[in-house]
Image (cartoon, rainbow, N blue to C red):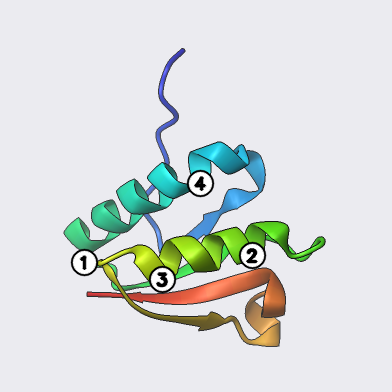
């Protein structure tokens, strides 16, 4: 299976990925963002039942590249997205 090449931008939407792919995906994506000079990223996890949001929060808490994170403002996805600051 060929790897999926994502454009490195300040937004990543997790809807198209399997939950088991998310930890490695975010780690690789954040590293690529830093290399591209992007230090603020919006991670869209969706609203649903909040399961993926909790998983994303857990991943962000453990990632040494993450300085801080918070829910996005309503116009950027509200509680269906996180704003992540990288170092």
Contact between marks 1 and 2 (CB within 8 A): the answer is no
Image side of residue 17 versus residue 30, left or right: right
Q: Position of residue 20 (x, y in %)?
A: 55, 38
Contact between marks 4 and 1 (CB within 8 A): the answer is no
Q: Residue at x 54, y 61 (%)?
A: 56
Mark 4, other Cα within 10 Å: few <14 / some 14–19 / many ≥20: some
> How far, Cα to Cα, is label 3 from label 2?
12 Å
In this picture, is 73 found above or below 34? Answer: below
Q: Residue furthest bottom?
A: 73
* Residue picked out by circle 3: 61
Mark 2, other Cα within 10 Å: few <14 / some 14–19 / many ≥20: many
> How far, Cα to Cα, is label 4 from label 1?
22 Å
Answer with mark 3 or mark 2, whichever residue precedes in sequence. 2
Mark 1, other Cα within 10 Å: few <14 / some 14–19 / many ≥20: few
Q: Quadrant of residue 52?
A: bottom right
> How far, Cα to Cα, is label 3 from label 1?
22 Å
Answer with mark 3 or mark 1, whichever residue precedes in sequence. 1
> How far, Cα to Cα, is label 2 from label 4?
11 Å
Kindly state the secondary structure of the residue where label 4 is placed: helix
Q: Residue at x 68, y 83 (%)?
A: 75
* Residue picked out by circle 4: 22
Contact between marks 3 and 1 (CB within 8 A): the answer is no
Answer with mark 2 or mark 4, whichever residue precedes in sequence. 4
Using the image, tell me which numbered label, if any, was put on residue 53: 2
Answer with mark 4 or mark 1, whichever residue precedes in sequence. 4
Mark 3, other Cα within 10 Å: few <14 / some 14–19 / many ≥20: few
Q: Position of residue 44 (x, y in %)?
A: 60, 62
């Amino acid at each position: 299976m060929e790897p999926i090449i994502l454009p490195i931008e300040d937004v990543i939407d997790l809807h198209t990925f399997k939950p088991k792919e998310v930890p490695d995906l975010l780690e690789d994506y954040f590293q690529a963002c830093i290399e591209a000079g992007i230090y603020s990223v919006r991670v869209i996890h969706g609203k649903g039942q909040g399961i993926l949001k909790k998983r994303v929060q857990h991943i962000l808490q453990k990632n040494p590249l993450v300085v801080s994170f918070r829910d996005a403002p309503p116009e950027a996805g509200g509680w269906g997205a996180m704003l992540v600051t990288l170092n």
